[in-house]
């Protein structure tokens, strides 16, 4: 995510940290690098101009303390200004005093509204809400069917009675109250470009139902075009927050760094993949840290807390202490790892790791291949891998559709991991993962 910005700022931060003394001359040199990095990332030139001016003024007038090097102080200023540019604080969803809470999604066709609707419903379900999806795009072929399919995937009700837009939303509100849905997510129609008919319909929906949260959904790949479109939408319907989709792709980051400044509205969520769980709450300070290569350990801990089965973790800890870590446990850990999402996203959250591994190609298929190999073993072989001789390795390779070399590689990896686990087993693991967060 935001790879181009991360690479550019990574080099700038490295140079700054190497500066033994900060002068007006080298500050201006580094600000030129920052300006170039932002413009190459398609950030609006007016936003870049203001950012450079503010950052340069603070950097030149800063007092250096004994506890920090000059370079660290300048990096801190850049970090603070990036955070301010991204919105300072995260967006908090508003809830209705009397359910259901209404969330209205707006944006152009193809921006990812429908997929985001399902992701948001999935996110709310994890927080013990009962959402209802309401497709009101009656113009695009198969738009309703798309949301119905996504609704089935995440086991969420979809209200799609064949009625006109306003009557359908009214019917959805009644249905939600009758069936204890506390939130309804309205997926509106988009167009390839802004037109009067679409805007009149959105204005009518907002006036009639007074949604608690209105989001403008934008494709993160569109750069400054997203900013211009957001301005028009905000003028017409006065939305509450912004959602940026497809941020896992080659998005340069221009939209994320421009849209808040241009509209004065916060970014609420970002889409980082195609799966229902590939959605992140947008934390400006954490994203600024990622851009500067400082990682995002808090988000990583939260993701682990959401994903990891605590009881299983405690059982594993006991096995580690008794030196009983088997390939069965290895398989279990692989499944937990897959739930965390793509490995490159996890690496990006680890402080100092993003730049080290930026050129590493993470093969997510390798995890599936490893899983297939272990599934091809007998239970006895998983518990006692040392009995796997040459003939057994050939059988396992045939059963998993892999090569004997792949099986050998896995067994070697297991041996190395087992050694590591023995060392970790001697350490005291925290009983509650949240204690990790308290130390940040």
Image (tube, rainbow, N blue to C red):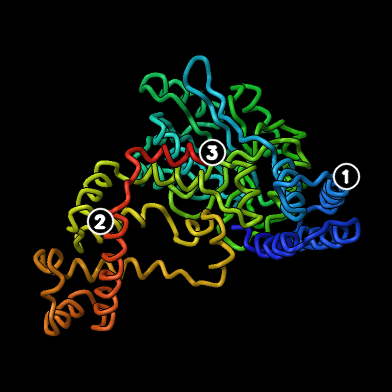
Which quadrant holds the N terminus?
A: bottom right
Q: Are marks 2 and 1 in contact (CB under 8 Å)?
A: no
Q: Which residue does the numbered mark 2 point to in the structure image?
A: 332
Q: What residue occupies the far right of the structure in this picture?
A: 25
Residue 226 image offset from top left, x and y in percent = 71, 50
Instruction: Give the class, few, some or many, for how many residues have Cα within 10 Å of label 3's Cα (few <14, many ≥20).
Output: many
Residue 236 horizontal/vertical position (percent) = 75, 33
- Mark sitting earlier along the chain (3/1): 1
Residue nearer the viewer, 232 or 82: 82
Q: Is residue 312 left or right of residue 171?
A: left
* Dot label at residue 61: 1
Report whether 107 appears left or right of 434: right
Callout in the foreground (3, 1): 1
Find disc 3 in the rendering and name its residue: 187
In the current view of this chain or complex, which residue is farthest to the front? Answer: 66
Dot 2 lies on which element?
Answer: helix
Q: For mark 1, give the secondary structure.
A: loop
Distance CA(mark 2)–CA(mark 1): 54 Å
**222 displayed left or right of 359:** right
């Amino acid at each position: 995510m935001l790879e181009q910005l991360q690479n550019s700022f990574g080099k700038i931060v490295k140079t700054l940290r190497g500066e033994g003394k900060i002068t007006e001359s080298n500050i201006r040199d580094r600000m030129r690098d920052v300006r170039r990095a932002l413009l190459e990332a398609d950030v609006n030139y007016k936003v870049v101009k203001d950012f450079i001016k503010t950052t340069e003024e603070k950097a030149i007038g800063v007092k250096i303390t004994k506890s920090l090097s000059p370079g660290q102080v300048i990096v801190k200023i850049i970090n603070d200004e990036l955070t301010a540019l991204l919105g300072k604080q995260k967006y908090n969803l508003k809830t209705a005093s009397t359910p259901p809470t209404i969330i209205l999604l707006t944006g152009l066709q193809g921006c990812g509204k429908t997929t985001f609707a399902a992701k948001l419903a999935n996110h709310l379900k994890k927080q013990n809400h009962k959402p209802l999806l309401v497709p009101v795009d009656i113009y695009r072929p198969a738009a309703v069917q798309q949301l119905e399919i996504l609704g089935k995937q995440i086991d969420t009700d979809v209200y799609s009675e064949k009625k006109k837009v306003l009557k359908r939303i009214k019917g959805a509100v009644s249905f939600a109250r009758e069936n204890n849905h506390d939130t309804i997510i309205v997926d509106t129609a988009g167009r390839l470009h802004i037109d009067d008919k679409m805007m009149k319909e959105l204005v009518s929906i907002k006036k009639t139902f007074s949604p608690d949260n209105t989001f403008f959904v934008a494709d993160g790949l569109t750069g400054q075009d997203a900013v211009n479109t957001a301005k028009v939408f905000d003028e017409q319907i006065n939305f509450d927050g912004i959602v940026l989709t497809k941020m896992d792709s080659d998005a340069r980051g221009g939209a994320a760094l421009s849209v808040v400044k241009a509209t004065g509205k916060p970014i609420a969520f970002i889409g980082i993949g195609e799966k229902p769980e590939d959605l992140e709450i947008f934390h400006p300070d954490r994203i600024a840290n990622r851009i500067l290569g400082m990682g995002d350990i808090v988000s990583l801990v939260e993701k682990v807390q959401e994903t990891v089965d605590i009881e299983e973790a405690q059982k594993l800890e006991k096995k580690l202490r008794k030196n009983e870590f088997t390939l069965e446990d290895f398989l279990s850990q692989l499944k937990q790892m897959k739930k965390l999402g793509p490995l490159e996203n996890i690496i990006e959250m680890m402080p100092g790791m993003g730049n080290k591994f930026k050129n590493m190609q993470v093969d997510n298929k390798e995890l599936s291949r490893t899983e297939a190999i272990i599934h091809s073993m007998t239970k006895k072989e998983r518990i006692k891998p040392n009995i796997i001789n040459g003939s057994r390795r050939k059988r396992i390779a045939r059963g998993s559709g892999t090569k004997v070399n792949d099986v050998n590689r896995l067994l070697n990896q297991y041996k190395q991991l087992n050694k590591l686990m023995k060392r970790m087993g001697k350490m005291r693991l925290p009983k509650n993962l949240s204690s990790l967060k308290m130390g940040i």
